[in-house]
Amino acid sequence: MRRLLTILAATVMLGAGAASAAEAGAAARGSCRPGLLFCEDFERLPTGGAATLKWGVDTRNGALTVERARRGNKVLHVRTAGNGHAFLRVDDFAAPGNRFFGRMRLRVDAFPTAPDWAHFTLVEATGSGSDEIVRPVGGQYAPTVPGTFWGVGADGGPTGDWTNWRESAPVAEDTWQCFEWMLDANGNRVAVWIDGVANPELTASTTDHGGNDVPFVLPVVDTVKVGWQLYQDGSTPGAYDLWIDDLALSTRRLGC
């Protein structure tokens, strides 16, 4: 009997240890690790207005606040009114060979359904050597379908790809998703993954970017902004809320 109790106790302890290990592993996956080009999981920041020396704030008719999510972890709440913007801004950024991967977990309360062709972006990369403003995560409301869809992000410069939304990539409201992107100067490539699945229809390269015949040239990226911007006034809804977590920039793909 005593031996049976000992075995049962050991089994319980082993199960608790396995659960603790699983919880620790889950926490590690969501935390910042050494060796990344940039990382922010918001856990060390106080709740309230976002303020840190790690990154800057770029807002107009918008705000960034750190708050606790339902699962207890901290997240960044992005809120804008109308066609305002609110971005977390990473300055003095540099990636070896001008090639890097990004990842964030994202939940958007609602996307625009008016005016027609309302265009929005969530990630923006700029730098020297090219006039392009590269926006790998962004999209547009298309009244002809109708629907709101993610689009090719090599836009903001002479290529003008922001109208290149893809019906095969519809947005999802009020649900957590994992977004990844890659920018690579070799071939001026942009790639996107949603929930770990590659979306080749959202890719771009020097001559294949969905815009006009002007070649797409990736800038030497020195600034990365993550948040929200809408480019048309009088939108529906009139304000936008989204939440971001586990933001990281790396020399390799991090996965979800």
Image (cartoon, rainbow, N blue to C red):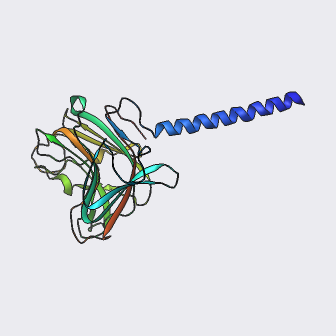
90 sits left or right of 75 in the view: left
* Residue 82 visible, this angle: yes
Which quadrant of the structure image shows residue 186? top left
Residue 225: image location, x then y, percent: 26, 47
Quadrant of image for the C terminus: top left
66 sits left or right of 142 in the view: right
Q: Residue at x 37, y 45 (%)?
A: 104
Quadrant of image for the N terminus: top right
* Residue 229 visible, this angle: no
Is residue 27 placed above or below 148 in the rendered structure?
A: above
Q: Nearer the viewer, residue 4 or 73?
A: 73
Is residue 76 placed above or below 252 in the rendered structure?
A: below
Total numbered circles: 0
34 sits left or right of 56 in the view: right
Which quadrant of the structure image shows residue 17? top right
Residue 223: image location, x then y, percent: 21, 42
Is residue 111 placed above or below 130 in the rendered structure?
A: below
Q: Residue at x 71, y 33 (%)?
A: 13
Q: Residue at x 44, y 57 (%)?
A: 175
Residue 100: image location, x then y, percent: 28, 35
Which quadrant of the structure image shows residue 130? top left
Residue 163: image location, x then y, percent: 20, 57
